[in-house]
Image (cartoon, grey):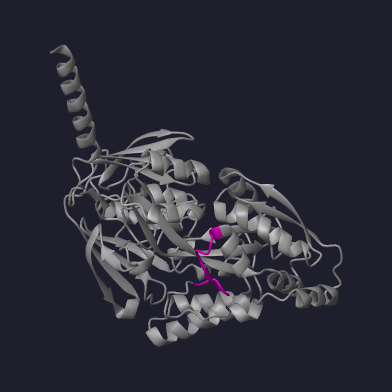
Amino acid sequence: MFNRMKLSVAALALMAGSALAQDSVTVGLVLEPPNLDPTSGAAAAIREVTQINIFEGLTRFGPDGSIHPLLAKSWDVEEDGKVWVFHLNDGVKFHDGTTMDAEDVKFSLERATAEGSTNAQKQLFANIETVEVVDPLTVKITMKAPTGNFDFNMAWGDAVIMGPESVAGNATNPVGTGAFKFVKWTQGDSIELAANPDYWGEKPALARATFKIISDPTAAFNAMMTGEVDYFPNFPAPETLAQFEGNPEFQVLQGSTEGETILAMNNRQAPLDNVKVRQAIAHAVNRQEVIDGAMFGYGTPIGTHFAPHHPDYVDLTGLSAHDPEKTKALLAEAGVENLKLRLALPPPTYARRGGEIIAAQLRAVGVETEISNLEWAQWLEQVFRGKDFDLTIISHVEPMDINIYARPDYYFQYGKPEFVALIDELAVTVDPDKRSDLTKAAQEMIAQDYVNVYLFQLAKAGVAKAGLKGLWENWPAPIDDLTAMSWE
């Protein structure tokens, strides 16, 4: 009798545990965010955790990249894009109980444009002239010049709305308006969120979510197989995907991202300030070998900083086709011998594996590399902020971000005046056909200047348990959206 009772209790406990699992999810995260404030850092991992889940913007990206209302329920575009009027949802509160209204929108946008702003994407706000509070639920934004895509700009993680009462602590204790509240950050291990019981919009199906930080590919595979992790949106071990594809306990989601993966070059660091040297390095690289060796075939070759799935994409891969003999000739023309370059690699698999392959390709044409493997915080400090590097490999996952090449102080330090003028014109152009022409011209200019070596568009290969629904197949922005997730 006692044994049967013990078994019954154990069975009930197991059933209870299974029931609990149905309102929680553990999401695998390859990189740990340096902080949790998407308006104060460039790391995509910040947005993966916080965007849409904790923090919300006036608008948001959908899974297909389309723009949807969020804190703004609607907006009017006046004077051919010179004036944008946003109408806010009523009854929205921050997680600390304070009201979100037009004053917070004004505060957030003016903070982003202020002198000394640490926002990584200041160009999103550069055309704002004034932000006016019409009433608590209406904001009027006047531009310096007409802007055709301001609703797109406002969907970025860098444009989320914050309250002045909590903004100072958002790096470690984020307070937003989203469907999930921050609970705990165990450095090096995990970030825990809980559903916001006072959420203004549709309540999420999940009660809890944990982002588990696992960068090692083998550990990621084991975590999925053992059930430690329910979902890896961007699985770091593509070589093992075949083992999941035939298993009914899992689902494999293959899609595209906005991640242009590049071998970035420091354009102001000799001899890389010479376009012939940059071109030589570009011709030394065999893209397909990198895709096959580092990504096991997952990835689309690119020849410029633009997503191939976009209708305005120009295929410029031929400009930098693999041609070792041309590399040697260009180096000779540039008078460069015994070239040795520093190759700084951040933690992602594509960078570490790709770096070894590219180092071998460069060695084959007489260019030696000194590889340094950096942790994410080191990479941000040394490469991104300090510009102390020759070469690095990184995926730029922000959508439509070719305008970063117009920033002379950006880490690869291009900022050609003619390109800046082109992007300035694009920013104020409303006509779709003219915008398309300017976008194509921008792609061609940076490809012909060999600013960087354009490797491949990062594929999104995710793995999840079979019963988890509401997952993004594609990744139009680095967002792990918890709000639509549910269990069958």
Q: Is residue 189 visible?
A: yes
Q: Residue at x 60, y 60 (%)?
A: 293
Q: Residue at x 30, y 79 (%)?
A: 79
Percent of width and height locating residue 391: 68, 59
Question: Residue pushed farthest left?
Answer: 1
Residue 49: within the magenta?
A: no
Is 292 located above or below residue 187 in the figure?
below
Q: Nearer the viewer, residue 247 or 462?
A: 247
Q: Residue at x 51, y 66 (%)?
A: 299
Is 239 located above or below residue 455 in the figure?
above
Q: State the predominant SS element of the stretch in magenta.
A: loop
Query: Which span of residues is magenta-colored?
Result: 295-306
Locate residue 137 relative to residue 185 in the image: left or right. left
Percent of width and height locating residue 279: 71, 74
Residue 305: within the magenta?
A: yes
Locate residue 479 relative to residue 466 in the image: left or right. right
Is 440 located above or below residue 27 in the figure?
below
Percent of width and height locating residue 46: 44, 48
In the picture, the quarter occupied by the N terminus is: top left
Locate residue 336 relative to residue 209 in the image: left or right. right
Question: Residue pushed farthest top?
Answer: 2
Is 55 located above or below residue 9 in the figure?
below
